[in-house]
Amino acid sequence: MEKTNRLGSSRLWMAFLTLALVCFPLVSDSRSSLLLLTQIFIYAVFAMSYDILLGYTGIISFGHAMYFGIGAYTTGIFMSRFDHTVLYFLLSLAVVLVLTGIVSYFIGVLSLRLKKHYYSDAHPSVRRIAAGGGGEVARFDERK
C-alpha cells in the first residue's frame, strides 16, 4: 500500500512541476531565465538518452555527442538563414533527421565491419574527423 501511495504522490509532484514549467513563460518576463531553462532541458534530454544507451542497454556510444552537435549546428544554421517561425523550425528538424541519418549510415557502413577493440579504436577517429581534424591538421592554412 505504501508503494502505491508513494507512486501517486510522485505523479502528483510531476504533474505540478509540469504545470509550473508550462506556465513559467506566461508569468515571467525574464528572457535569460527562459533561455537557461531551455538549455537545462536540452542537456537533460541528451543525458537521459545517453543513460538509456549506456545504463540500460550497455551499448557504448562514441558518436552520441557528434550527432547532438550535428543536430544543433544544422538547426542553428537553418534558423539563421530563414524566418524564425514554427514551420521553419519543424522543417529544420526534418533536415536534421535526414542529415544525421545519412552521416550515421556512412559511419555505420565503415564501423560495423570492425570487431572487438578495433570498433572502439575507430570511433574516436571518426569523432576527431567530424570535429575538423583538430591539432595541427586543422591549422595547415595559417601563415607563419
Image (cartoon, helix red, strand yellow):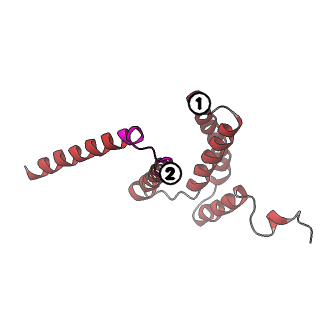
Indicate the amino acid at tag 2. Ser
Circle number at residue 85: 1
Question: Helix or strand or loop: what does disc 2 sit on?
Answer: helix
Q: Residue at x 21, y 49 (%)?
A: 10
Q: Earlier in the sequence, mark 1 or mark 2?
A: 2
Asked if the residues shown at circle 1 and circle 2 are in contact, with their CB atoms under 8 angstroms apart, the answer is no
**Quadrant, the C terminus:** bottom right
Residue 130 location in percent, x, y?
Answer: 70, 55
- Provide the residue span drawn in magenta: 23-35
Circle number at residue 65: none
Indicate the amino acid at tag 1. Thr
Residue 97 location in percent, x, y?
Answer: 59, 37
Q: Residue at x 63, y 60 (%)?
A: 123
Q: Quadrant of residue 75?
A: top right
Residue at mark 2: 32
List the single residue furthest toward the top: 87
Please tell me whether residue 82 belongs to the stretch shown in magenta.
no
